Image (tube, helix red, strand yellow):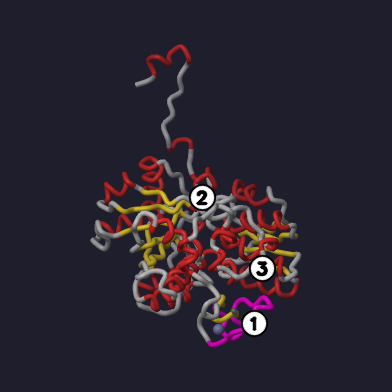
Amino acid sequence: MKIACTACDYSAALDRAVHPCPSCGEPVELHYDPGEIDPAAAIAGQGRQQGILSDLSPVLPPFAPTERVSLGEGGTPLVHLSRLGRRLGLPNLFLKYEGANPTGSFKDRGTAVALTQAVRTGYTLAGTVSSGNMAASVAAYAARAGLECHIMVPAHLRPEKVFTIAVYGPKLYRVEGDYSELYRKALALGRERGIFFAVSDEPFRVEGQKTTGYEVVRDLARLGLAPTHVFNPTSAGGHTAGLLKGFEEMAEYRAIATKPAVVAVQAAGCSPIATAFARGETRITRVEHPATEAHAIQNPFPPSGNRVLRALARAGRGAATAVTDEAMRRAQLALAHGEGLFVQMESAASLAAVEEWRGAGRLGPSDVVVLIASGSGLKNPGAFAPSDFPVADVRLDDLRWAIK
Ligand SMILES: [Zn+2]
C-alpha cells in the first residue's frame, strides 16, 4: 500500500501525510498492492450496521478494531422510489439516503477513515475547510476521538448552519476571502502546525467515500440487480472521485461484471466540471461569478475537478452535467411529497438530472438508476420561508368545519 498521485508518477510511503502531490499539485490517493483488498468479500458482507470501518474492512486500510474512530456511519437505506419511478417510467429507481449518517451527511464515511488515520499516526490536532456538512462531521468525529479541532468556514455561512458545527466544541474560524485560496492556505498551515486537515480530497477521506458505491452494489445484489447509473451531486469532487475509485476496484477484482456510469451533477450557476466535460476539456476553469443558492455544491475551483475528469475519461462512460436551482427545488419537493424523503436542496440535484436525462431519452425502463442524496433536509430548515407552505389557522371550536 502506498500514496500515489492521480495525475503524475509521484508516489510515497504511507508513513507521512502527503497531500496534495508535491510534484504537480493534483490530488493523491491510496494504491493497494494486489490482494491487499477484497472487493468481493466487501460486497458479500452482511452489513452489520457497526460502521464502515468494520462492515467494509476488506476494502479499507487495515486498521485495528481498537484504533477505529466511528459513530456507526454507513449502512444507510437504499430506498426504492416506486412512485417517482412509475411517473418517470423507471421501475428500478433507487435513492441512497446519506442523511441517515450520524451527522446527517455522506461526509461521515470519509471522516471516520481520515480521523482514524490521524489518530493512529499520532496527530492530536485535526480540522477541515468546509461550507457546512464536512465541518459538522469533522467536529463531531474529532470530539469522539478526543482531538483538538480547527474548523474554517466561509464568512457568509448562515447562523443556523454555524450551530450545527459549533455544538461539537471545535475552534471555529469564519474566514473572509477567496474559498479555494483558503483551502490551499489551510493545508500549508496544517503541515506547519501539525494539524491533520481532513479536506474533501484527502486520500483517506476518499477511501471512506468510496464505500457508498460498495453498499449500493451490495444492497442491489440482494434484489438480483446491478446499478447501470449512479447520479451524484458534485462540489469539490472528493465523493465522486471515491465512487469512481470504488467501481474501478470492483471491476479490476472482477467483483462486478460492468461498471455503472457515474454522473457528476453540478449547479448550473457554478459548474466547472460539467462545463469542462461538455467542452471535451481535460482541465477545469475557475468560475469567476458563481450564481446559485445550492451552496453545498458551489465550489468555483474544485480541487478534485481535473481528477474527476480524468477518472470519467478512464471509465469510458459516465458524464458530468448541470441542473438549475429551480429544477433542484422542484425535485426536493417531489421527493418529500412523493416519497416522504426530505433531502437537502443540493442532494435533490441528482433527481433533477435524472428527470432531464429521462426526458432526453438518455435513460430507459431497463436501467437501474441510483440517486445519491448526500444530506438530510433537516440540516438547512432556513431554506424555506413560512409562506412557502399553506397552514390553516383554526380555533378549536371551529375544527369540525375546518377539516375539508
Ligand atoms: Zn502529481
- Does 358 sit left or right of 101 as displayed? left
**Pointer 3 or 2: first along the chain:** 2
Residue type indicated by callout 2:
Gly
Which label lies toward us, 1 or 2? Answer: 1
Q: Which residue is mark 2?
A: 99
Q: Which residue is mark 3?
A: 117
Residue type indicated by callout 1:
Ala
Residue at 45 percent of width and 64 percent of height: 270
- Does 216 sit left or right of 9 as displayed? left
Quarter of the picture containing the C terminus is top left
SS assignment at label 2: helix
Residue at 43 percent of width and 69 percent of height: 247
Q: Quadrant of residue 314?
A: bottom left
Q: Is residue 372 magenta?
A: no
Residue range corresponding to the magenta coloring? 9-27
Q: Is residue 342 above or below residue 210?
A: above
Q: Which residue is mark 1?
A: 13
- Does 94 sit left or right of 43 as displayed? left
Judging depth in this view, the residue of 321 and 255 nearest the camera is 255
Judging depth in this view, the residue of 31 and 380 nearest the camera is 31
Q: Is mark 1 within 8 Å of ligand 1?
A: no
